[in-house]
Amino acid sequence: MHLLRELTFLAEEGAPRTRAWAGAFKRLLQAMQRGADQAQAAGQAALDRAILGRYHRRYAALLAQGDAAEPPPVRTAGRARRSPGAQLLYRLRRDQAAVLRFAHDLAVPFDNSQAERDVRMMRVEQKISGGFRTPTGAATFCTNRSYLSTARKQGQHALTVLHDALLGHPFLPAIP
């Protein structure tokens, strides 16, 4: 999760006042991740309401602690500029529902690493070969990558699903 990287940086390299709230915020998110992983392993669909309530209260308290620690915005030509810590606090507040979605719905992963890995091959193909020659070629590449990625996430072997698809028996993902 990119937020963890930013929080780690602020906790290690930020101003002394920033280090405290950033380190505590990172520990909170990691504790929430462990709690969500344990609940998922126990077969639960969501975290207990009491636990979620404690997490939300701690999240709000850390936002307040961060607001108190961060300096006010500096007015330059145009708009006021916030410190990196204040910018992160703004995003954590604005996007709180998205940041905590993994705790409310255990089917949602804690980070977006898998999504980034899925998109990476498209980016590598563009970078190495300079792009696609035709829109049809790009669409075919994306279709094949999507098919293989879905099959892999469903526990299927890539060569097996490709072989079966070429024989006219394509793999169809399970419907949740």
Image: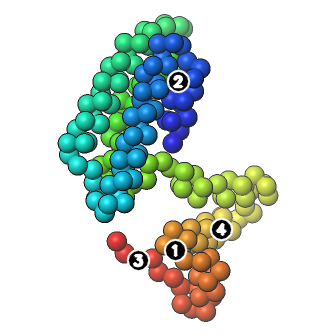
Report crowding for label 3: few under 14, some 14 to 19, many 20 or more residues within 10 A (C-alpha).
few
Kindly report which numbered mark, 1 or 2, lies closer to the viewer in this rendering. Answer: 2
Residue at image mark 3: 174
The tag earlier along the polypeptide, 2 or 4, is 2
- Quick one: SS at disc 1? loop
Question: What x and y, as percent, mark residue 115?
Answer: 53, 55
Please, is residue 95 above or below residue 135 in the view? above
Q: Amino acid at mark 4?
A: Phe
Residue at image mark 2: 11
Q: Amino acid at mark 3?
A: Ala
Kindly report which numbered mark, 2 or 4, lies closer to the viewer in this rendering. Answer: 2
The tag earlier along the polypeptide, 1 or 4, is 4
Question: What x and y, as percent, mark residue 137?
Answer: 68, 68
Q: In front: 13, or 35? A: 35
Q: Residue furthest right?
A: 129
Marks 4 and 3 in Cβ contact (< 8 Å): no
Kindly report which numbered mark, 4 or 3, lies closer to the viewer in this rendering. Answer: 3
Side of 162 relative to 29 (left or right): right
Residue at image mark 1: 155
The tag earlier along the polypeptide, 4 or 3, is 4
Q: In front: 29, or 89? A: 29
- Quick one: SS at disc 3? loop
The tag earlier along the polypeptide, 2 or 3, is 2
Q: Amino acid at mark 1?
A: Gly
The tag earlier along the polypeptide, 3 or 1, is 1
Q: Amino acid at mark 2?
A: Ala
| Residue 143 seen in the current view | no
Kindly report which numbered mark, 2 or 3, lies closer to the viewer in this rendering. Answer: 2
- Quick one: SS at disc 2? helix
